[in-house]
Amino acid sequence: MPHPVTVARSATRTGLLIGRSHTTRPPVAVDAAPIAVDLGSSVLRIWLGPGRTLSVPLGHGLRSPVVRRGRIVDGPACVTELRRILRDHRTSVPVGGLVVACRPVLAAPAEQEATRRVLAAVLAPSRLLFLDSVRAGAIGAGAAAGTLLLADIGAQLTEVALLEDGRVVAARRAEVGTRDLNHATTAGMLADAAARLVRELRQDPALRPLVRTSLARGVIVIGDGATRPDVTARMVSTLGAAVHRAASPRTAALTGAGMAAISALRHPHDTKRRPERSA
């Protein structure tokens, strides 16, 4: 299924146009406002403001991937690819603005640093904040309040987190996703992997009461796997709990990161201490 592409159509202020163009069409202009980025294993999503997103395949046609299992594996090639995407889609970005980037939960410092270098080279932000994708997904799904279990079943990663009022209390992840579905990896196996991560959280005595409370509420599922009824139905039967698919599950994390970007811009005192921090 082709990935939909929606590009901003504002012309109030021009930012930095990445790359060069040989067409006479004017570049798409974006207000000097915060943006959010979800650099996934198979899709690049950029939030340019409410209702304005760029969503395109990442690494299509390349001999080797630039992002694998949520990790940037080739920084220079990733920079080139992002610049090409922005150029080809006539998308300009604000210069020196605030950028909120989604990151996989439990990402190692070296993995976050690799992402920081790529985004700094392409977007040149004045401030770069990182937000766990599971936390961003909870915000985007409108379910951040209270105790919550959220599963993000993406293309190459499955992440499960226990959150309390929007804060990640504990999390687990597995390197399997919808891109692995074939004759060897079934939808049932993918659902079982997500359910296993929930059980691992439940086995921790300190977390057991919170997990019990959240299972009574039901598990929120985002990501590409949330669009597959065979995956979510299997999770229901395996966990013995309700499973709720977020509205627009593929973009829930990006939407949440965009909301966090707006909040950070409105409350700059929370982020002035350091040019880069985790949200």
Image (spheres, helix red, strand yellow):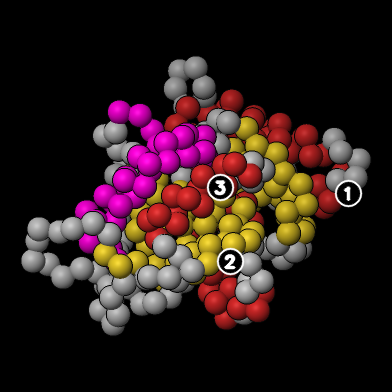
**Residue receiving disc 1:** 209
As measured in the structure, the alpha-carbon distance from the residue carrying label 2 to the one carrying label 1 is 38 Å
Residue 35 in sight in this render:
yes
Which of the pair 127/179 is nearer the observer?
A: 127
User: Which of the numbered marks, if any, corresponds to residue 113?
Assistant: 3
Q: Is residue 26 left or right of residue 277?
A: left
Of the two numbered discs 2 and 1 on the same chain, state the one appearing first in sequence: 1
Report if residue 86 lies within the magenta region. Answer: yes
Q: Is residue 234 left or right of residue 214?
A: left
Residue 156 x, y percent position in the rendering: 50, 34
Please rate how many residues cluster around mark 2, counting C-alpha atoms within 10 Å: few if below 14, some from 14 to 19, many from 20. Answer: few
Residue 171: which quarter of the image?
Answer: top right
Please rate how many residues cluster around mark 3, counting C-alpha atoms within 10 Å: few if below 14, some from 14 to 19, many from 20. Answer: few
Span shown in magenta: 63-92
Q: Amino acid at mark 3?
A: Glu
Q: Are marks 2 and 3 in contact (CB under 8 Å)?
A: no
Please rate how many residues cluster around mark 1, counting C-alpha atoms within 10 Å: few if below 14, some from 14 to 19, many from 20. Answer: few
**Residue receiving disc 2:** 275
As measured in the structure, the alpha-carbon distance from the residue carrying label 2 to the one carrying label 3 is 14 Å
- Tell me the element at label 1: helix
87 to 198, vertically: above or below:
below
Residue 240 x, y percent position in the rendering: 74, 39
Which of the pair 116/203 is nearer the observer?
A: 116
- Tell me the element at label 2: loop
Of the two numbered discs 2 and 3 on the same chain, state the one appearing first in sequence: 3
